[in-house]
Amino acid sequence: MNTSIKYKEDKLIKFLQALPAPALAFSGGVDSALLLAACKEANVPVKVITCSTPLVPAFEKEDTVHLAEELDFEVNFLQLNPLELPEFCLNDSKRCYHCKKFLFTAMQEKAKSLGCTCLLDGANLDDLGDYRPGMQATKELKVLSPLLECGFTKADVRALAEKYKLSIANKPAYACLASRIAYGEAVTLEKLASVEKAEDALKALGLHDVRVRCHNNLARVEVAQSEIELATTKLRQQIISAVKEAGFTYVTIDLEGFRSGSMNINL
């Protein structure tokens, strides 16, 4: 491990050790998993809180449980449904803000009930490079972001996760299912279920970085650049069948390939 990562690791450990009674918003992704592992490394007692919502696919929920077991932490689950919020379902450019405010307010209340004095999240420097209105919500709520404070990029996170031998060190980033639905188009449980079913089916075909973007009844499928030829030739008919079976009428494959945050390009 290079000296820069070692310096950041030491800084992170000291940051965590200075916190009084922290709780962690745990998503099951590599960022919050690294924070949990770092708390263990630093001998910092931390309460783990996870939101179970219709926006999170089943495999992410399973990963959360497995990771917590891997690191010997108990997860405090909150059953929450952002679809109860009209302003969220409206799906304007502040959708993520409304959702984060709702979820993190609930997690802060849970943290207080567990005797915690602060709530942590897994935001890192790379998150500043995209449109992230949810970060405004966590800022307003005074949620702490240790990875961001200690200068971690996503590459740094993965490097340290490998050092800690985390099973998901190279797990692809995975945004919530609502991020697949075009702005201005109402978020519904049915659309979320269709997106999840379609993405699960495409992954089962052997595709890796997959996003099924919902534009009403049209699915715009993004795959890794290296898999576009495969998707448009050998797997073409299987992709069409799988996506239509998930509930879409039309199927397209985006020739630009997978791009994180591609729904944000016009904001």
Image: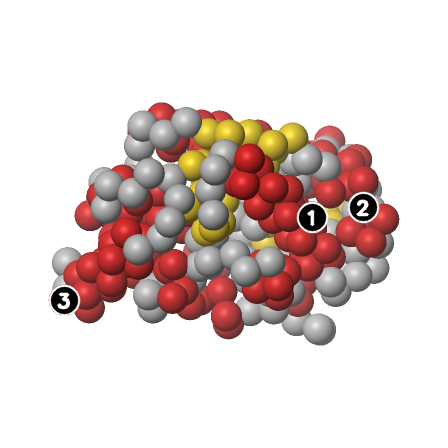
Q: Position of residue 35 (x, y in %)?
A: 35, 48
Q: Position of residue 190 (x, y in %)?
A: 79, 35
Whether tag 1 and tag 3 are in contact, CB under 8 A, the answer is no
Q: Position of residue 21 (x, y in %)?
A: 40, 44
Q: Position of residue 151 (x, y in %)?
A: 34, 68
Q: How is the image coloured?
A: secondary structure
Pick the front one: 257 or 95: 95
Mark 1, other Cα within 10 Å: few <14 / some 14–19 / many ≥20: some
Q: Earlier in the sequence, mark 2 or mark 3?
A: 3
Please tell me whether mark 3 sits on a helix, a strand or a loop. helix
Toward which corner of the image does residue 81 lie, by quadrant?
A: top right
**2 or 3: mark nearer the eye:** 2
Who's the residue at 37% across and 49% down the image?
20
Residue that numbered label 2 is attached to: 85
Q: Which mark is residue 3?
A: 3
Quadrant (top left, top right, bottom left, bottom right) of the C terminus: bottom right
Q: Amino acid at mark 1?
A: Phe
Q: Earlier in the sequence, mark 1 or mark 3?
A: 3
Mark 3, other Cα within 10 Å: few <14 / some 14–19 / many ≥20: few
Q: Earlier in the sequence, mark 2 or mark 1?
A: 2
Who's the residue at 81% across and 40% down the image?
84
Left or right, residue 139 beside residue 226: right
Q: Amino acid at mark 3?
A: Thr
Q: Amino acid at mark 2?
A: Leu
Whole-number angstrom distance, CA of label 1 to CA of label 3: 39 Å
Pick the front one: 111 or 212: 111
Residue that numbered label 1 is attached to: 102
